Image (spheres, rainbow, N blue to C red):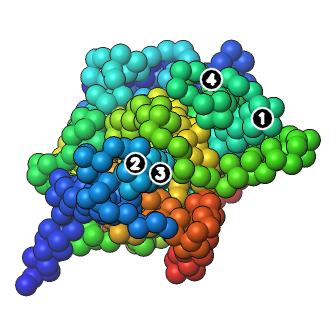
Amino acid sequence: MTVGESAMHRVSMGVRPIRTRLAVTLVAYGALALVTCLLAPLVGSTTISLSRAFDRSIPFANNVDAQIFFVARLPRVMAGALVGAAFASAGVVLQALLRNPLATPFTLGVSAGAALGAILSITFGAALTLGPLLPVPLASFAGAFCSAAIVYAIATRPGRPISTSVLLLAGVTLNSFFSALILFVQYMGEFAETYRGLRWLMGDLDVGGFGPILSALPLIVIAFVIFALLSSSLNVLSVGTDTAASRGVNVARTQRLAFVSAALATGAAVSLAGPIGFVGIVVPHLVRLMTGVDHRIVLPAAALFGAAFLVACDLVARTVLTPVEIPVGVVTAMLGGPFFLWLLIRKS
Amino acid sequence: MTLQVERVAFGYPPTGKATQSFSLVDVSLSIQRGSLTGLLGPNGCGKTTLLKLMAGVLRPHKGSIGLNGRLLAGISRRALAKQVAVVPQETHPAFDYSVLEMVLMGRHPHLGAFQLEGPEDIAIAQDSLAATGTSHLASRPYMTLSGGEKQRVVIAGALAQVPDVLLLDEPTASLDLAYQMEVASLLRRLNRDRGVSMVLATHDLNLAASVCDSLVLVRAGRVLAHGPTSEVLTVDMIRQLYGVEADVRFHETSGHLTVVPIRHVP
C-alpha cells in the first residue's frame, strides 16, 4: 500500500456516514430505553403478576396488581423517562450554547427559581390551581419561568450574540440568591412544611398519576423539536461564535432558541419531579464517550440514555432499601458524583 | 470585481446609540476577482474588524459593502457563507471533534436544517483535506494536532464551503518558520489553482511580500495606501504605517521584496 492509498484508506475508515451512525444510535439507545421502561414497572417492593394486572375480568377496584401497575408504577416510570430525557438533552444544549462542558440544566438558575416557587407554594399553602395543574408544580414552573426571564434579560442585547460569560455568571448568582431565599423561607416556615420542602428539593418521581405528566409533556415535546432543529447549528456554534456566523448560522437567533428551549425543558421537568441533579451532566458526557461529539447524534442518544438512566436510578431508589424508598435525587447524585469524578480523573 | 468596500465606518459597541470609539473611520477598497490581497497595519488599526465586516459577521454603521454587485446587507447569512469563508487566527472547539467532522462543518451553509451530509459533501470534504495535505489526519481528534496542522485543517473547512472569497486573519501568527512557509505556499497554490480570491490580514511583511499581489495599508481606521505590492511596500509607507525605519529591497533568490526593520522612529 502506498502512502496515498493508506491515507485514502484511513479517510474512508473515518467516514461512517452520519445516516448510518444516526440510525444505529436511535435503534441501540431506543432499545435500551424501551427495555428499561418495560421492565421497570414489573420490579418493586411488592411482586406483581402481569397477567393479573392486565386481566380485564377482575374489577379494577379489587385488582391490587393492576392498581400497583397502573397507578403507582407506570406513571412513575413514564415521569422518570420524560424527566431523564429532558434533563440530559437540556444539558447537551446548554453545554454547547455556553461552550462549557461543565454546564448543567441548573447552571442558569432555572432550577433554583423553580425550587423557590415550589417552596413558597408549600410554605404559604397557596391554593392556586389551573385546570389539572396542582399548586406546587404550577408555582415551580412560574419560578422557573421568572428566573429564566431574568437571566435572559441580563445576558441579551438586541441584535447581538448572547454574552455567554454574562449568562453563566447571572445564572450562578441567581442560583445562590434564590437558594438563600429558599433557606430564609424554610427557616421561617413550620416544621412540617419545611420537611415537605426539603423532600421536594431531593426530587421525587412519584407524581401520583398521569395528569402531571400530560401537563409537562407538550412543553418538553416543543423543546425537543427545537433541539432537533438546532442540532446541526450547535456543532458549528460550539466551535466558536464567529466561526458559526461565517458558516451561515444566525448566531443570535440560535443562541436565543437554545436558551429558551433548554429553559422550557428544564422548567417543565423540574416542576414535574423536582431538581434531580447530575442527570444533565453525567449522561451527556457518558454518551459523548460512546458516540462521539456530533450534536445530531449526541442529542437523541442523550435523551434516550437519560430516560433509561433515570428510570434505572428510580428503580434502585424504590427497591434497594425495601420497604423504605430513598429519594431518586440522592441515588443519581450518589451514583453520578463518584462516576463523574472517575471520568475527570481518567481524562486528566 | 468581487468585494467592494465603500466609505465604511464602524465603531464598538456594534449596536446601540452610544458608539464609544470608531474602529474604522472611512474605508474604501476593492478586491479584484482571483487576487490575493494583503491587509497590513499596526495593532488595533481595524484589520480584524474589516475582515468581519467583509464576512458579514458585523454590519457597517456607515457606508456599504458589495459582493459581486450585491449589497452584503441584502444577502442572507446562509447564502453569504456559500460565497465567503473565514479562517480565524485560532480555533478552539468546545468539544473533541475529529478533523473530518471539523471540515464537514464547512458544508453547513449548503445543508438544510434537517439535512444530513451526503456522499457529495463527504467528497468535497475529502478533496479539501487533500488540497491542504491533511488527508492522513482525517480521523484524528482536532485538539491533538500541532498548530500548523490545525491551521491547515481550518483552511480545509473553509474550502469545504466552496467560497469565491477566503478571508484569513493572521493565519501564520502562531506558527513556526516551516509551518509559515507551508501555509504561505498552500495559499498561493489555492489562489492559483482554484481561483479563490483571498484577503489576508497579517503583521508579517515578508509573508505579505511573498504571497500577495496587492496590499491595503490601514492606519487609524483609514486606508493609507492601496495598490500592487511592489508599489505600496516602500520605505516611506512602512515608516508612515508603523513608525519604523526599514530596509526594503528585491531579493534575487526568493524573487520578491524583503523587509528588514532597522529602528523605531518616534
For disc 4, the chain is A
Q: Residue at x 48, y 41 (%)?
A: A209
Tell me how far mark 1 sits from mark 4, CA to CA.
Answer: 14 Å
**Which residue is identified by label 4?**
A129
Q: Residue at x 13, y 74 (%)?
A: A9
Position of residue A180 measured from the top left corner of the image (x, y, whole percent): 84, 45
Q: Nearer the viewer, mark 1 or mark 2?
A: 2
For disc 1, the chain is A
Q: Are marks 2 and 3 on the same chain?
A: yes
The image's mark for residue A72 is: 3
The answer to whether any part of residue B226 appears in the image is: no
Q: Earlier in the sequence, mark 4 or mark 2?
A: 2
Q: Earlier in the sequence, mark 1 or mark 2?
A: 2
**Which residue is identified by label 1?**
A120
Image quadrant where one finds the C terminus of chain A: bottom right
Query: Going by the image, does A69 lie left or right of A278?
Result: left
Q: Are marks 4 and 2 on the same chain?
A: yes
The image's mark for residue B175 is: none
